[in-house]
Image (cartoon, coloured by chain):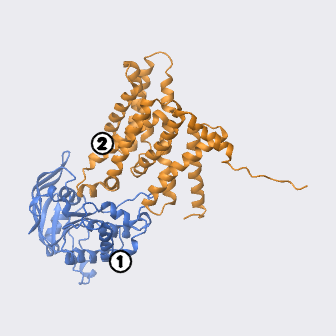
Chain colours: A blue, B orange
Amino acid sequence: MKAIEVKNLNVKFGNLKVLDNLNFDIEEGLVTAIIGPNGSGKSTLLKAIMGIIPYEGEIKIFGEDHKKNLHLLGYVPQSYEIDKFLPMTVKEFLFYSSLNQKENYEQKILKVLNDLDIIHYENRKLKDLSGGQVQRVLFARSLINDPKILLLDEPISEIDIVGQKEFYNIIHHLNKDHKLTILIVTHEVTIVHHFAHHVLCLNKKLVCNGPISLLFNEKILKELYGREIFIYPFNKPINFEENA
Amino acid sequence: MEEKFSFIPLTNLSILKKMLEIFNYPFLIKSLILSFWLSLVFSFFGIFVLIKRMSFFSDGIAHASVFSLALAFLLNLDFFLISILGAIIFASLIFYLERKTKIHTDALIGLIFVSFLSLGLILISLKSGYQPELLSFLIGNLLTISDFDFYLILFFSIISIIFMIFLFKKMILVFLDRTESHLRGINVNFYEYLFYVFLAISVILGIKVMGMILVTAFLILPPMIASLISRSFKQMIILTLTLSVLNVMISYMLSFNFNLPLNATIILWNSIVFYFVFLLKTLKLIK
């Protein structure tokens, strides 16, 4: 089944066209990476899917207009700034997001924290956590209302390399065990093939749409970034002499 | 010869007796009820005000209301009703400009503050003579509240508190994260607008009896003190409400005992508690 369908999507900010006539579908159960240079409209695309910016065109979530199915979306932003004066604990933060819960929210919170292996954060204040830890809590929050699709907007941009590897494991776990469809905006073009099945290349227009192996097509990358970029598979050592 | 020192407790019988005299004066009972109740109402609102970083709001609305005051003078209308109407217009304007200009709320509050204050002052200058209402409006007077104003303030503040308690969880989510609220099906703009209007009207009603400075003090000081020592948000809410009532009680006692102006005593006592807690925290005597 199609998780997301986008038809003739156009977004303008004043006279500036940010997204130009996008057409694509995302199949249920896939991890799709959205890549492209800065200002190419990646985050704007997520905002249009969430219905928080005006657009022209049609967006469907599981066959229905996206505004009817927004509750099926979970969202992890690039960063989250909590007021340093606010003594809100992780458990409380998740409680305020757990609206429309039929089951016991307390059990649900513990279940999600356990699932992401951060149960020890439960009573810690959000303001005392590091950037990576807050990002994990944001993952937990995005799961608290049982979404079917996760939208991730550069969730690892402020995290060190060890933390990044953990995030890829989380994405893999959520996709495999929770059967979540995942859309991830990322600049990590060199390693994205380790956790994504599909890729959308965006530079205001859709430059490519297909399996992740498209990223190894130098022609596509040149069209996308406007210059030559070489991407090596992770397990292949880089031959610097060859590149020189 | 051994000198004897005797300890004089602050709450000795004579003070207690003096305080109980309040009950012989109905207007004092009204002022007592209102100051306790409004301290609770404003410190509850204050939790949201601090999260939204709009502690300047009450100052802005109060000063902008000089325009309402001037208009009421010139047109011979009831000031109280005009100022409530004015508060709704100011709140709507801040809300509208916030969305259209993307300028921070505090700067827009400043804009409303200075533009309507200056317009009000120009309008007032058109009418000659001394306008004592202007001064009493900004300073407030707990002791001269009429029955009509007393019940109006009580009625409106109870309605707004019921709404806020009923919508508490959603309001907090709106103030914590607009995108997440939107995905959870909350009409973010509606809730924010509702809060602005409730706060603006409450501020106007509060200023009438307590004055602008005391309203601002109730809005920001109890939640600020509570945030320093709370281990959770729930604890912060409970502490905020407890502190607001406790501080008014202590201020009443100090005011009666030392014959100090009540409003200033409440504000000063709250500030002293803040500095004291901050000092204890800095010296790591409390966590």
Q: Amino acid at mark 1?
A: Val
Q: Residue furthest top?
A: B128
Quickly name the residue at label 1: A162
Q: Examine the rendering and report whether any part of residue A109 can be seen.
A: yes
Question: Tag count in the figure?
Answer: 2
Q: Chain of mark 1?
A: A
Numbered disc 2: secondary structure: helix
Write down the quadrant of residue A7 in the picture. bottom left
How far apart marks 2 and 1 lie (CA) works out to 41 Å
Is B91 or B195 nearer to us in this picture? B195
Tell which of A28 and B22 is nearer to you: B22
Q: Quadrant of residue A124?
A: bottom left
Residue ID at (39%, 34%): B152
Can residue A226 be seen here? The reply is no
Q: Is residue B135 left or right of B97 when viewed as pictured?
A: right
Q: On the rendered image, what quadrant is the N terminus of chain A found in?
A: bottom left
Chain under disc 2: B
Q: Is residue B72 above or below residue A98?
A: above
Residue corresponding to mark 2: B101
Residue B30: x %, y % from top left: 50, 36
Residue A143 placement: quadrant: bottom left
Q: Position of residue B237 (x, y in %)?
A: 44, 55
Tag 2: amino acid: Thr
Q: Position of residue A60 (x, y in %)?
A: 11, 59
Q: Position of residue A218 (x, y in %)?
A: 16, 72
Label 1: element kind: helix
